[in-house]
């Protein structure tokens, strides 16, 4: 009864509150110490996994001072281990860059495309000019300096057609642009034999095969075009030509 009365006055109640507060502070300090110890243990394991020597801690956490990873004894052991090692002599060898597998023009075009620039187009051909060889007919063309066996091989299907371009419905300007881009891509990928479909001109104004004649004139002026022949009926007949390109490798 006296204790209860004393508690009413505040003596016993105040003492119990202090004990609770002290217990909470002790538990919080214990948690902080455990977390700190766990963090140090994790750091020590990581340093050990990397092959580093852990830093020795002093009795007081605040008294920790940085020490070198390798002490003098470790340095002496390392010097003994590499005592017989000799430095590599200078062989005076020149390290050359890899040899390019494409021409300078194609490499320049690839660099321009990589940075988003428009590639250099082929020289523009005349819409009206035609070489003397085409005066006798435009069903075939052979560049000067090459033998007739090239024409014969094209007609017999010696080379497979690896790419095709259809210019139906294009204007002269559109056809010229598309033809340039198509042939540049074929040269870049080392494609030899291609087909150009220009149509027979039945849908042209006044029934004149403008695109057919113009495309064949362009091809005869392109230095990378060695020969062309009019395709067989199954491949387009008079509305297409089979073109043999120069090997750029």
Image (spheres, rainbow, N blue to C red):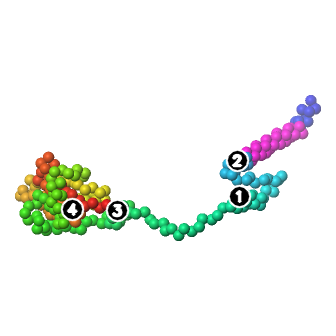
Q: Which residue is mark 1?
A: 81
Q: Residue furthest top?
A: 1
Magenta segment: does it hold 26?
yes
Ranked by sequence position, the earlier of labels 3 and 4 is: 3
Q: Which residue is mark 2?
A: 45
Mark 4 vs 1: CB contact within 8 A: no
The x and y percentages for residue 21 are: 81, 42
Magenta segment: does it hold 64?
no
Mark 3 vs 4: CB contact within 8 A: no
User: Under tag 2, what secondary structure?
Assistant: helix
Q: CA distance from mark 1 to mark 3?
A: 50 Å
Q: CA distance from mark 4 to mark 1?
A: 68 Å
Q: CA distance from mark 1 to mark 2?
A: 27 Å
> Residue at coordinates 27% horizontally, 65% vertically from top-left?
121
Mark 1 vs 3: CB contact within 8 A: no
Q: Which residue is mark 4?
A: 225
User: Under tag 4, what secondary structure?
Assistant: strand
Of badges 1 and 2, the one in the foreground is: 1
Ranked by sequence position, the earlier of labels 2 and 3 is: 2
Ranked by sequence position, the earlier of labels 1 and 3 is: 1
Circle number at residue 102: 3
Binning the other alpha carbons within 10 Å of mark 1 as few (below 14), some (14 to 19) or many (20 upward) gives few
Ranked by sequence position, the earlier of labels 2 and 4 is: 2
Q: Residue furthest bottom?
A: 92
User: Under tag 1, what secondary structure?
Assistant: helix
Left or right of residue 3, residue 102 in this image? left
């Amino acid at each position: 009864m006296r204790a209860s009365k004393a508690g009413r006055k505040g003596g016993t109640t105040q003492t119990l509150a202090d004990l609770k507060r002290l217990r909470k502070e002790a538990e919080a300090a214990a948690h902080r110490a455990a977390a700190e110890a766990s963090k140090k243990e994790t750091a020590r394991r990581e340093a050990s996994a990397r092959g580093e020597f852990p830093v020795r801690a002093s009795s007081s956490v605040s008294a920790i001072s940085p020490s070198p990873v390798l002490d003098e004894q470790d340095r002496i052991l390392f010097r003994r281990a590499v005592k017989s090692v000799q430095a590599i002599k200078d062989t005076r060898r020149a390290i050359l860059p890899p040899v390019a597998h494409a021409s300078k023009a194609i490499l320049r075009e690839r660099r321009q495309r990589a940075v988003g620039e428009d590639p250099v187009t082929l020289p523009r051909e005349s819409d009206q000019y035609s070489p003397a060889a085409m005066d006798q007919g435009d069903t075939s063309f052979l560049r000067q300096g090459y033998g007739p066996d090239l024409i014969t091989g094209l007609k017999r299907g010696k080379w497979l057609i690896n790419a095709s371009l259809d210019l139906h419905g294009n204007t002269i300007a559109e056809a010229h642009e598309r033809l340039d881009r198509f042939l540049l891509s074929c040269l870049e990928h080392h494609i030899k034999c291609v087909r150009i479909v220009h149509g027979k001109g039945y849908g042209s104004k006044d029934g004149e095969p403008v695109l057919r004649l113009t495309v064949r004139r362009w091809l005869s002026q392109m230095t990378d075009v060695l020969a062309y022949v009019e395709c067989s009926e199954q491949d387009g007949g008079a509305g297409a030509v089979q073109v043999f390109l120069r090997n750029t490798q």
